[in-house]
């Protein structure tokens, strides 16, 4: 009881006659203007058939149409595959890198900075560079693989519908792993040494130590990192758009690119907004499930 | 933990391999950008250019208004940093002097903000900016960038401000300092490293933005660098060596941040991401 009244007083104290509110108002105004209003507007658009000509209220028909639409299945499938594979390999690679960066050796900070680079480059530049690397006639990847006799003919990495999605995922892994790496590294450095020392005394080998000490300690960081990277991959736009723009033959079309094409190629803003809202809903639902599950596991 | 020489060598080898994996595309960018056009399309591929030239770096400025694009990116990104830091630090301070329940709320809001697909917002943005007559203007970009980064900025700074003892505020108040005085003259100076880290984070995000500038700027003079470069890809007159040169130019500010502000960079990224 006593605590509550102290808290209340403090809050009142901050805001009463002490200009406390002024600290918050600019942010609230800006966020209202550039976030809450547009979101509401966008959601509102999804209930209309807005296009260049105008907009009429259509209720839930957009949502029903999209739900029943067969052509959405492929992009949805691509998005899921893209997300799962990207996150998984970013995790593995990030963990691997963080594990070795964790050792106290000279030059460790330099390596850390170098390994961070893929994440810092603007996605547009990354995509452009990888387009060049993947070039089917003069690209360095084909040249290298051919010279090492790993492939017999030059492959069209971004032009072959069977290869394109994997190629795009590979780029996403390359540019995404540093985030995982940094998160995991922070987590690794927080693990108390005593645990490892105790394990050493008990005669546990390296692998056992990793499984029973390292990973359990990292559970919280891992769950946050996996959640964030999954969200980002699921709604990713820039990379896919520049690399393949959803082609060839829709083999790399993801939900975001579908929204973009629907809105800006076909000018069907109503439908575009609807699919975008679906993306948001899927992310909200999956995230809540994920978070609830993590909470129950005690992370 | 003392490492044997054998272990150390093993670790170095692994890290060198990883670094090569991370840097190869950038190295390839540089190599390509230094080649003459005929050598770019040579088979077999040359690793060390037979003839090195810097003409690509010169040409690329002439063919397209790259300088203008660069300037636009700088103006938009730096302005966003300034705006988000000023506005965000104030809000962060207010939240830092709150307690408990708010933390969960802010966390949820930030997480939800992260889930919003950019493609959802571009239509209302376009219409909003058109209505406000702000299409093809810097404020349109700055506001868009701010929307995406402000929640995270508030979160990052809130965390830091919380660690500054309230007693300092109180001591200053007793000496007659107003709330604003406390904030500007005591809290902020104490938080400079955190402000720099956060600023770097905002700059990186803004610099890399593509979708919003693509939609909000239809006038070529107002393109930002990312949009400008993407418009060059596939153009008949532009060759890969020139494109790679443009790409290198695009990552120069980031390299500079690396070199001089590396410490803050890592701290900023870890904090911005470690939502705990």
Image (cartoon, rainbow, N blue to C red):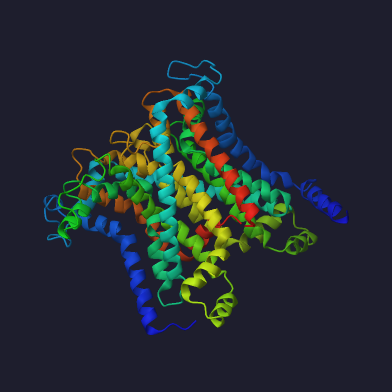
Camera-side residue of A34 and A198? A198
> Looking at this rendering, what residue extends furthest in the right direction?
A1
Above or below residue A26? Residue A47 is above
Asked if residue B123 lies left or right of residue B98, the reply is left
Residue A220: image location, x then y, percent = 58, 58
The quadrant in which the C terminus of chain B is found is bottom right
Most foreground residue, A187 or B113: A187
Write the residue at 56% across / 60% down: A219
Residue B14 located left or right of residue B175: left
Relative to B199, A161 lies left or right: left
Indicate the position of residue A132 as horizontal and vertical percent values.
24, 48
Q: Position of residue A2 (x, y in %)?
A: 88, 56
Number of numbered discs: 0
Which residue occupies 27% across, 40% down?
B232
Asked if residue B183 shows in the view, the reply is yes
The residue depicted at 48 percent of the width and 32 percent of the height is A276
Quadrant position of residue B158: bottom right
Q: Quick check: A134 left or right of A79?
A: left
Residue under the point 53% across and 37% down: A282
Quick check: B162 above or below A203? above
| Residue A42 % position (x, y) | 53, 29
Instruction: Answer above or below: position of A298 versus A237.
Output: below
């Amino acid at each position: 009881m006593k605590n509550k009244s102290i808290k209340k007083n403090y809050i009142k104290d901050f805001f009463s006659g002490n200009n406390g509110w002024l600290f918050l108002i600019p942010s609230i105004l800006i966020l209202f203007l550039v976030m809450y209003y547009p979101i509401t507007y966008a959601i509102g658009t999804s209930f209309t058939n807005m296009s260049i000509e105008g907009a009429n209220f259509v209720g839930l028909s957009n949502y029903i149409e999209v739900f029943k639409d067969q052509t959405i299945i492929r992009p949805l499938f691509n998005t899921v595959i893209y997300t799962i594979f990207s996150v998984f390999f970013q995790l593995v690679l990030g963990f691997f890198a963080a594990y070795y960066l964790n050792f106290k050796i000279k030059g460790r900070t330099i390596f850390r900075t170098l390994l961070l680079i893929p994440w810092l480059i603007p996605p547009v530049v990354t995509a452009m560079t990888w387009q060049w690397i993947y070039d089917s006639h003069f690209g360095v990847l084909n040249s290298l693989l051919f010279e090492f006799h790993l492939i017999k003919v030059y492959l069209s990495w971004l032009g072959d519908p069977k290869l394109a999605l994997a190629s795009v995922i590979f780029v996403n892994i390359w540019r995404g792993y540093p985030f995982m790496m940094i998160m995991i590294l922070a987590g690794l450095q927080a693990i108390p040494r005593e645990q490892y020392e105790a394990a050493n005394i008990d005669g546990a080998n390296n692998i056992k130590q990793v499984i029973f000490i390292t990973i359990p300690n990292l559970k919280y960081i891992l769950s946050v990192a996996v959640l964030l990277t999954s969200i980002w991959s699921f709604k990713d736009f820039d990379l896919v758009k520049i690399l393949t723009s959803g082609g060839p033959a829709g083999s790399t079309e993801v939900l975001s690119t579908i929204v973009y094409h629907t809105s800006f190629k076909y000018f069907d803003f109503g439908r575009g907004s609807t699919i975008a809202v679906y993306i948001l809903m899927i992310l909200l639902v999956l995230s809540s499930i994920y978070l609830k599950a993590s909470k129950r596991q005690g992370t | 933990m003392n490492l044997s020489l054998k272990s150390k060598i093993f670790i170095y080898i692994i890290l060198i391999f990883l670094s090569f994996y991370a840097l190869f595309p950038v190295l390839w960018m540089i190599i390509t950008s230094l080649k003459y056009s005929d050598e770019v399309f040579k088979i077999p591929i040359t690793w060390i250019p037979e003839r090195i030239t810097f003409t690509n770096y010169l040409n690329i400025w002439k063919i397209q208004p790259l300088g203008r694009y660069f300037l636009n990116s700088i103006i938009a990104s730096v302005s966003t940093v300034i705006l988000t830091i000023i506005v965000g630090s104030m809000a962060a301070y207010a939240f830092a002097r709150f307690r408990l329940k708010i933390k969960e709320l802010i966390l949820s809001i930030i997480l939800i903000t992260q889930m919003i697909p950019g493609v959802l917002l571009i239509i209302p943005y376009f219409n909003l900016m058109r209505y406000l007559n702000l299409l093809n203007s810097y404020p349109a970009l700055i506001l868009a960038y701010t929307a995406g980064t402000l929640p995270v900025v508030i979160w990052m700074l809130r965390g830091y401000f919380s660690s500054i003892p309230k007693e300092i505020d109180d001591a200053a108040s007793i000496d007659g300092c107003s709330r604003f005085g406390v904030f500007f003259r005591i809290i902020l100076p104490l938080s400079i490293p955190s402000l720099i880290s956060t600023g770097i984070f905002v700059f990186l995000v803004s610099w890399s933005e593509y979708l919003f500038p693509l939609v909000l700027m239809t006038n070529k003079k107002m393109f930002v660098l990312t949009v400008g470069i993407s418009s060059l890809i596939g153009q008949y007159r532009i060759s890969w060596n020139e494109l790679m040169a443009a790409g290198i130019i695009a990552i120069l500010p980031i390299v500079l941040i690396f070199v001089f502000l590396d410490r803050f960079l890592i701290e900023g990224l870890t904090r911005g991401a470690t939502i705990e």
